[in-house]
Amino acid sequence: MKADIAIINGLLVDSQRIYPGVIYIQDGKIIGITQSLESRPEKIIDARGLHILPGAIDGHVHMMDPGYTDREDFTTGTSAAARGGVTTVIDHHRTVPQVFSARELIEKKDYLEKRSVVDFGLLGGLNLKNVGNLRGMWEAGALGFKGFTCELHEADALLPGNLMEILKDIRQFNGIALFHCEEDSLLKKNEELLRKEGRKDPMIIPEWRTTEAEELAVRAVLHASRSTGARVAVAHTSLPSLVLEMAQARAQGIPIYTETCGQYLYLTEEDLEKQGPFVKFTPPPRKKEEMEKMWWCASQRLIDMVNSDHCPYPYSEKEAGIKDIWLAPFGIPGVETVTRILLDGVSRGRLTLQDIAYLRSERPALIYGLTGQKGSLQIGCDADLIFVDLKQRAMIDNKKIVSKCGWTPYHGREFQGDVVLTMVRGKVVMEDGKVTGEPGWGRFVTRKG
């Protein structure tokens, strides 16, 4: 077997099993997997004591480039991804200009190709005026579309009539839309009442962005998917009851998928009360018992994807909300910490490595049309691999954060298990905590065929 690289002595992990094997890589792709070394390429990597998983696909990142590069740029953001074992990011449309047409999508792709350390895909945006542009963006390579059911981050609120119109169009070409689900009118009424009370404390956030607001919006999206047959995904689900509703709908043939994020598996209302603006995101962290149930949902694979919703802001902008929580923006960094949260969950018996391969790699690849290219340890797939040390135990420190924002809500917390090497198409882009990949190595990815 002619190969550039052989990886020996590691334990290979997919969604079903863990097994010993040798991986052979040629021209950036996996060309063979054997039980023992059958040929000796020039480069051999010894993974003794480590587990090898397919690289993560993070379908929910806001790298803010071009436009908001004081918060993040694509090079720093994809470097952070490499540190966190993410080999493909799917960037959302909220840059300058926002991506609402095929022309804007292509211009953004061309701009980013020289800036990315890992591979990347793009989502187009949904608003009240661009229904006629959706097929064009899909044919130009968009992996899907992102919309909001509430006014947030300068986005239009897509109400049930808008959802039906948009999803009827998307169904025609079998696209997929990811929705931020909070009911707009309820949020506005809650905000009005809280401001009248003069409240400025962090605990206004769960009273403003209530569980009822999330429930109502998810059910509207679910109804629209049922009625149109269009594929939809619900972003950053925070409630186990909604996970169960969507799982039941899928069992009935409705094409709805559930995303949650690392923060809903680790942070709670108690953290919001203690850390204030540095744990301000929406939907907000829920009660501890809800968080524990979310781990159970993940272990039962009722959740389809665990992504980051990486949305960094400079420390100073978040700090402005310490005395007045209204002044802090919504969003936290996360692309480099989600895998560590999940690995720590493995150490605590909350889920398995096979679950991580499913939630972070195989299932996202299927949902976004990348199966056969990304997300699997299979012959013919890109050699996107992460080497994991389950014994490594370390504290997360703001000083070691790769993201341009330079902070994390997990500062000072100890996690067991870490990614010690990240490989994108056969090239090592991170090793022992140091990002070695160069901007321009990352390629644009889209569906084949």
Image (cartoon, rainbow, N blue to C red):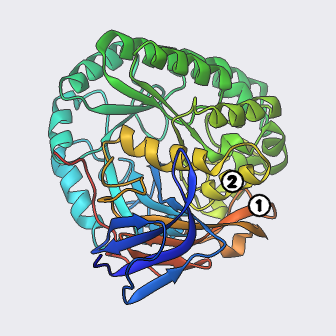
Give the residue drawn at x 21%, y 34%.
Answer: 134
Residue 283: percent from the left, percent from the top? 62, 33
Q: Is residue 71 visible?
A: no
Q: CA distance from mark 1 to mark 2?
A: 7 Å
Drawn side of residue 2 relative to residue 255, left or right:
left
Q: Looking at this view, name the residue that lies furthest to the bottom.
A: 42
Residue under the image location 39 percent in, 46 percent down: 365
To which residue does mark 1 refer?
Answer: 415
Task: Classify the position of the N terminus by image quarter.
Answer: bottom left
Q: Tell me the kind of residue under disc 1.
A: Phe
Q: Which mark is residue 115?
A: none
**Residue 254 lies in quadrant:** top left
- Classify mark 1: helix, strand or loop: strand
Q: Residue at x 37, y 76 (%)?
A: 439
> In the drawing, does residue 202 fall left or right of residue 420?
right
User: Residue 334: image x %, image y %?
Assistant: 60, 55
- For the C terminus, the image quarter is top left
Q: Position of residue 16 (x, y in %)?
A: 54, 44
Query: How many marks do you count on the picture?
Result: 2
Q: Is residue 177 above or below residue 141?
A: above
Q: What amino acid does circle 2 point to?
A: Ile
Mark 2 or mark 1, which is nearer the start of the sequence? 2
The local secondary structure at tag 2 comes to: helix
x and y percent of residue 361 in the render? Answer: 47, 50
Q: Residues within 10 Å of mark 1 (few under 14, many from 20)?
A: many
Q: Is residue 41 left or right of residue 186?
A: left
Q: Are marks 1 and 2 in contact (CB under 8 Å)?
A: yes
> Image height check: is 271 above or below 89?
above
Task: Give the residue number, with chain letter if any, for mark 2.
Answer: 341
Residue 244 is drawn in which quadrant?
A: top right
Say whether residue 95 is visible. Answer: yes
- Asked whether 218 or 431 is in front, the reply is 431
